[in-house]
Image: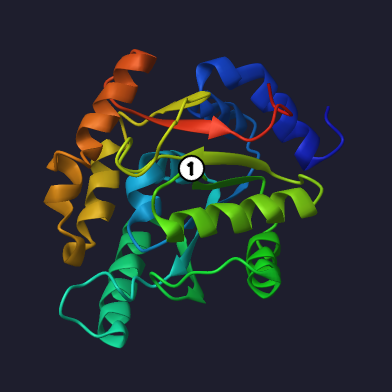
Amino acid sequence: MPSSRRDFAKNALTATAALGLSSFTRQMGQIQYKMKIVCVGGHPDDPESGCGGTLANFIAEGHDVTIIYLTSGEAGIEGKSHADAAAIRTKEAITACEILKAKPVFAGQIDGDSIVNNEWLYKLQSLILGEKPDIVFTHWPLDSHKDHQCASLLTIQTWARSGKKFALYFFEVCTDSQTMGFKPTDYVDITTTRELKRKTVFCHTSQNPPGIYSASDCNHGMMETFRGIEMNVAAAEAFVRMGNEFK
């Protein structure tokens, strides 16, 4: 029997990496091991569109999920002031988390003006480590959006400075138009949670959710289907695992 939560997570990932994280969650669920999962996104709707199906899988298995939004989407609604946009998008995120049954946390950076410095590293590190996570998901660092990059870099620094106390995975959004050079190491079958994920994305009405699923440069419906084909299932989400600790 593993001597610690981290050892157990490490062993479980080693045994199931080739099968994807969905097998990992099922194995954890079978032995009634409750994990803490954290997802760090740049804006409201990023975690939902990037790995909402995977988060739903974890929750269905009885694990706890916290979503940390680096910003509140202040610059994300044309014609609205930062204050008004933040209020609208915060409410949308809270509604999405209620449907998902996840805990929302808002870090307090400003959409379009996110920064990486020691002050914010300590702030985000405190938020992440305060959750005592077993697994953390965040943006792929080679992303065209500055806020996504900042969320990723701050999370990577937290992982490194913590002594790699949690497994770190990167998700994709708008592959090729935003997430670039993404070569998955792991897949999660989201066939059974695909519709729930879609409901959470559609909570973000200010962000044109039909476009998120059908735009020529950002089609998450097509991404789910394509990753599903790669995994030989109906729909999947793909991830890149940080480092080789869990290979």
Q: In this view, which residue lies farthest toward the top? A: 232
What is the count of numbered marks? 1
Q: Is residue 145 left or right of residue 199?
A: right
Q: Looking at the picture, which amino acid does disc 1 mark? A: Leu
Depth check, front residue: 165 or 138: 138
Quarter of the image with the C terminus in it: top right
Depth check, front residue: 102 or 92: 92
State whether residue 65 appears in this view.
no
Q: Residue at x 28, y 54 (%)?
A: 200
Q: Quadrant of residue 3?
A: top right
Q: Is residue 142 above or below residue 151?
A: above
Instruction: Say few, some or many: other residues with alpha carbon within 10 Å of mark 1 (under 14 / 14 to 19 / 20 or more).
Output: some
Q: Residue at x 43, y 76 (%)?
A: 110
Q: Secondary structure at mark 1?
A: loop
**Residue 24 picture location, percent across and down:** 57, 28
Q: Is residue 118 above or below residue 53?
A: below
Q: Is residue 38 left or right of residue 225?
A: right
Depth check, front residue: 27 or 232: 232
**Residue 109 picture location, percent across and down:** 49, 74
**Residue 41 picture location, percent across and down:** 45, 57
> Residue at label 1?
142
Q: In this view, which residue lies farthest toward the right? A: 3
